[in-house]
C-alpha cells in the first residue's frame, strides 16, 4: 500500500534492524581510580601487556579482559598486591555471535581496603570451554563456578568438585545458554492462544 | 541386620551401607540397629523438608556420634529460572520477576536491578529526589520486616517460641505500610526503572511516623526476651564461628561479616539512592559467632528506624514532587487510582489517552508493548540487602529486553560458609549457625 516495498509493515515487527554500538576499548586516562589500579597492576605484573587483551571503562566501571592462561596469575596479584580481597562471584554470559569467544565468565572484585571495584572478563570458544578455576584464590568462587558450569557449560579446570548445583544432576544441557529454549506452553482462552514467552513476537 | 520391618524406620542394604528411612515416631529400633553397626560414622540427610533448615535446604551431615565431621549443602530445590525468564520480558516487566527471588526482601531485589538498568541508561542522576527518598524508606522498612523473620524463625529453630510470635506481630505492621503505599504486602514491583510505580497515598507520612513510634516501643520490649538471656546465650555464644579471613575469602557479606568487626556496609562505603544524606551507624560485633550476628540484627532495627524518620522528614517538604523520571520515553505510564472495584488504572489517565491525546496513547502503547531500549553494555550495581551485598550484573545488547541479568545473591554466597562454621561442632549447633546466616532459599536458588 502507498508504494511500500516489502511487507509494508510499520509496526516494528517487520525486520527494522538497529545497529547497536558496544563499548570499545578505552584509552588512558581512564578516570577515577582506574588509572591507579592499572598502574599498580602494570608495576606488580610485568606481563600486563600480554595478559590483558582489552581495558574497557564504561559507565564508571573498569573491565579488564584477560587471557584465560593468565587468569590465576592476575587474580593472585590483584588479591595480594592490589588488595582485592573479595570476589563477588562469577557470572557467565553467552554471546553466540561473538565467534570463537562465545562464552564469557565475568568476575566482580571488591577491594574493602581501598573501596574499589573492578571486573575481570575471560572469554573462551564454545568448542573449548575451559577456564582455570579461582577457588584457590578466593574460596568463595566454589559455588559460583559450579553455578556458571551448570548454567553455561563452562568447565573450570582445577575446581575441587565441579558438579551441577541448581539443576538436577542428570539434567541435559545448560539452561542459560542462548541456544537453550525457555520452554513453556501456550495458554488458550476463548479460542485464542497466547504463545509461550519464547515464541511471542519481539522487537528487533 | 534387621529381621523385622519397622514402619517408622525401615532399613535396606545398599552398596554404600545400610540406609534407614526415618519417618518419625518410635526410633527405638533405629537406635538399636545403629548401636550394632561396626562403623562409627553415620551420614544423615537433613532436609530438604525439615522444620529447622530455614527453607528447602538439604544438609548432608557426616556424624561421629554427636559431632559433625562434614557438612555439605544441597541446594536448587527452589530454582525457578528467574534469570532466564527475564531475558524474554521487557526491561520494566523484569521487576515483577526479580521481586520474587529473595521473597523476604523484594524491594532490595527491585532496587539492585533498577539501579543497574538506570546506570545502563545513564539516568542515575535524573531519578527524582522523592523517588530516592521513597526507595530508601521502603528498603529500610523491608530491612526491618526481613530481620523480624530472621530473628523470629532463628529463635524458633533454637526452641524459643515467644520471640517468633512477637516478631511476626511487628512484621505485620511493616507489611501494612507496604500494602498502604504500594498496594501489595509482598512482591510489590514497586521500584521501577526511573523511579517508583506510584506516589505515596494521602496520609502516608503520618502513618509511617506512627508506625515507627509503635515499632520502637515494641522493639524495646522484644529485646528483653533474648538479649542477655542466659539460655539463649548458651545456645549462641561461640557457635558458628567464622572469622574475618574466612568470611573474606568466602565472599561472605552482611551481618555475618559485620560480626567479625568489619564495618562493611555498602550504604556507607558506596552509597546509592542518596544514602549519603542520612545519619545512621553501621552496627558491628567482634564475636564472630551466632550471638554477634543476632545482636547486629537487633541493633540494625533501630538504625533503620532512624533512617525512616529522616525520610519522613524529607517527604514532608516533597509533597506533590515527581516520583518518576521526566523522560516520557522511559517512565512507565502506570497511573493507578482506587476505584469502586479496588486499585486499577486511573480513569483520568484512560480518559486522557483514549479521548484527548493521541500522542499519550501512542506513548502508552509503545512503552507497554515494546518497552524502551537500553544502550548496549554491562554494569554491576550493588545494594546492601538485609543479608549482605545483593549485586545485579546487568547486560544489554541494545534491545528492549535484558540480554542477561545475573544476581549476586548474598544468601547464596553466605550459605557456602555453612561447612566452615559447622564442621567439628555438635548437630544441634548447625541449626543455630544456619539460622544466623539467614539464607532465603528463594534467593539462593533464584
Image (spheres, coloured by chain):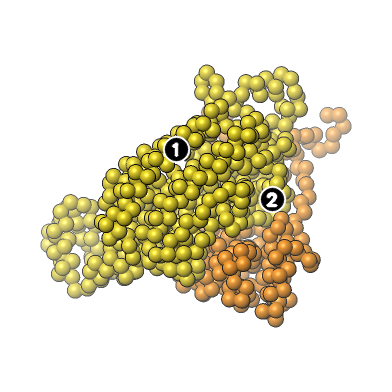
Q: Colour of chain B?
A: yellow
Q: In the figure, B392 relative to B262: above or below? A: above
Tell me the CA gap for discs 1 and 2: 39 Å
Q: Which residue is mark 2?
A: B120
Colour orange belongs to chain:
A
Checking the image for residue B213, the label placed there is 1
Find numbered disc 1 in the image and state the secondary structure of the residue it sits on: helix
For the N terminus of chain B, the quadrant is: bottom left
* Residue B292 x, y percent position in the rendering: 39, 60
* B11 or B361: nearer the viewer: B361
Residue drawn at 23 percent across, 52 percent down? B23
Residue drawn at 67 percent across, 79 percent down? A45
**The disc numbered 1 marks a residue on which chain?**
B
- Label 1 crowd (10 A; few <14 / some 14-19 / many >=20): few
Residue drawn at 52 percent across, 70 percent down? A138
Relative to A182, is B400 on the left or the right? Answer: right
- Label 2 crowd (10 A; few <14 / some 14-19 / many >=20): many
Q: In the figure, B114 relative to B434: above or below? A: above
* Residue A172 x, y percent position in the rendering: 49, 58
Q: In the figure, B390 relative to A74: above or below? A: above
* Residue B367 x, y percent position in the rendering: 69, 35
Figure quadrant of residue A91: bottom right
Q: Do labels 1 and 2 touch, CB within 8 Å?
A: no
**The disc numbered 2 marks a residue on which chain?**
B
Amino acid at each position: 500500500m502507498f508504494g511500500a516495498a516489502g511487507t509494508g509493515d510499520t509496526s516494528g515487527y517487520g525486520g527494522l534492524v538497529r545497529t547497536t554500538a558496544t563499548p570499545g576499548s578505552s584509552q588512558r586516562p581512564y578516570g577515577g581510580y582506574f588509572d591507579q589500579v592499572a598502574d599498580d597492576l602494570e608495576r606488580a605484573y610485568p606481563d600486563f601487556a600480554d595478559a590483558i587483551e582489552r581495558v574497557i571503562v564504561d559507565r564508571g566501571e573498569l573491565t579488564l579482559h584477560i587471557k584465560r592462561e593468565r587468569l590465576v596469575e592476575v587474580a593472585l596479584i590483584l588479591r595480594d598486591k592490589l588488595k582485592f580481597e573479595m570476589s563477588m562471584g562469577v557470572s557467565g554470559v553467552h554471546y553466540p555471535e561473538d565467534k570463537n569467544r562465545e562464552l564469557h565468565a565475568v568476575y566482580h572484585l571488591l577491594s574493602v581496603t581501598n573501596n574499589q571495584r573492578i571486573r575481570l572478563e575471560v572469554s573462551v570458544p564454545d568448542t573449548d570451554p575451559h577456564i582455570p578455576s579461582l577457588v584457590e584464590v578466593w574460596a568463595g568462587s566454589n559455588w559460583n563456578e559450579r553455578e556458571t558450569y551448570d548454567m553455561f557449560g563452562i568447565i573450570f579446570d582445577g575446581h575441587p568438585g565441579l558438579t551441577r548445583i541448581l539443576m538436577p544432576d542428570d539434567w541435559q544441557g545448560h539452561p542459560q545458554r542462548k541456544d537453550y529454549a525457555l520452554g513453556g506452553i501456550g495458554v488458550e482462552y476463548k479460542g485464542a492462544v497466547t504463545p509461550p514467552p519464547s515464541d511471542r513476537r519481539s522487537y528487533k | 541386620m534387621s529381621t523385622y520391618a519397622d514402619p517408622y524406620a525401615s532399613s535396606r542394604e545398599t552398596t554404600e551401607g545400610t540406609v534407614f528411612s526415618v519417618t518419625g515416631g518410635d526410633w527405638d529400633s533405629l537406635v538399636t540397629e545403629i548401636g550394632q553397626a561396626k562403623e562409627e560414622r553415620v551420614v544423615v540427610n537433613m532436609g530438604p523438608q525439615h522444620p529447622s533448615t530455614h527453607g528447602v535446604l538439604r544438609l548432608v551431615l557426616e556424624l561421629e556420634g554427636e559431632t559433625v565431621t562434614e557438612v555439605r549443602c544441597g541446594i536448587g530445590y527452589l530454582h525457578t529460572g528467574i534469570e532466564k525468564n527475564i531475558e524474554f520480558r521487557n526491561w520494566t516487566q523484569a521487576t515483577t520477576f526479580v521481586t520474587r527471588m529473595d521473597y523476604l526482601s523484594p524491594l532490595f531485589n527491585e532496587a539492585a536491578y533498577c539501579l543497574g538498568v538506570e546506570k545502563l541508561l545513564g539516568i542515575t542522576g535524573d531519578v527524582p529526589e522523592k523517588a530516592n527518598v521513597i526507595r530508601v524508606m521502603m528498603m529500610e522498612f523491608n530491612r526491618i520486616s526481613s530481620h523480624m523473620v530472621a530473628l523470629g524463625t532463628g529463635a524458633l529453630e533454637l526452641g524459643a517460641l515467644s520471640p517468633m510470635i512477637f516478631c511476626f506481630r511487628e512484621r505485620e505492621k511493616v507489611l501494612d505500610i507496604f500494602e498502604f503505599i504500594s498496594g501489595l504486602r509482598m512482591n510489590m514491583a514497586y521500584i521501577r526503572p526511573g523511579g517508583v510505580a506510584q506516589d505515596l497515598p494521602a496520609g502516608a507520612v503520618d502513618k509511617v511516623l506512627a508506625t515507627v513510634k509503635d515499632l520502637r516501643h515494641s522493639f524495646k520490649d522484644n529485646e528483653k526476651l533474648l538479649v542477655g538471656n542466659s539460655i539463649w546465650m548458651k545456645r549462641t555464644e561461640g557457635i558458628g564461628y567464622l572469622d574475618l579471613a574466612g568470611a573474606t575469602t568466602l565472599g561472605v557479606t552482611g551481618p555475618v561479616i559485620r560480626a567479625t568487626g568489619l564495618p562493611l556496609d555498602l550504604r556507607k562505603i558506596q552509597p546509592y539512592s542518596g544514602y549519603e544524606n542520612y545519619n545512621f551507624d553501621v552496627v558491628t560485633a567482634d564475636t564472630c559467632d551466632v550471638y554477634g550476628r543476632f545482636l547486629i540484627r537487633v541493633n540494625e532495627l533501630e538504625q533503620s528506624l532512624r533512617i525512616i524518620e529522616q525520610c519522613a522528614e524529607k517527604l514532608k517538604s516533597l509533597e506533590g514532587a515527581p516520583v518518576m523520571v521526566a523522560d516520557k520515553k522511559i517512565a512507565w505510564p502506570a497511573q493507578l487510582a482506587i476505584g469502586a472495584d479496588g486499585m486499577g488504572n486511573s480513569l483520568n489517565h484512560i480518559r486522557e489517552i483514549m479521548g484527548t491525546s493521541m500522542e499519550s496513547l501512542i506513548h502508552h502503547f509503545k512503552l507497554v508493548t515494546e518497552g524502551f531500549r537500553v544502550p548496549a553494555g554491562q554494569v554491576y550495581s550493588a545494594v546492601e540487602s538485609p543479608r549482605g551485598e545483593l549485586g545485579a550484573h546487568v547486560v544489554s545488547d541494545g534491545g528492549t529486553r535484558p540480554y542477561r541479568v545475573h544476581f549476586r545473591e548474598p544468601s547464596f554466597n553466605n550459605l557456602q560458609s555453612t561447612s566452615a562454621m559447622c564442621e567439628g561442632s555438635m548437630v544441634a549447633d548447625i541449626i543455630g549457625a544456619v539460622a544466623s546466616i539467614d539464607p532465603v532459599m528463594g534467593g539462593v536458588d533464584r
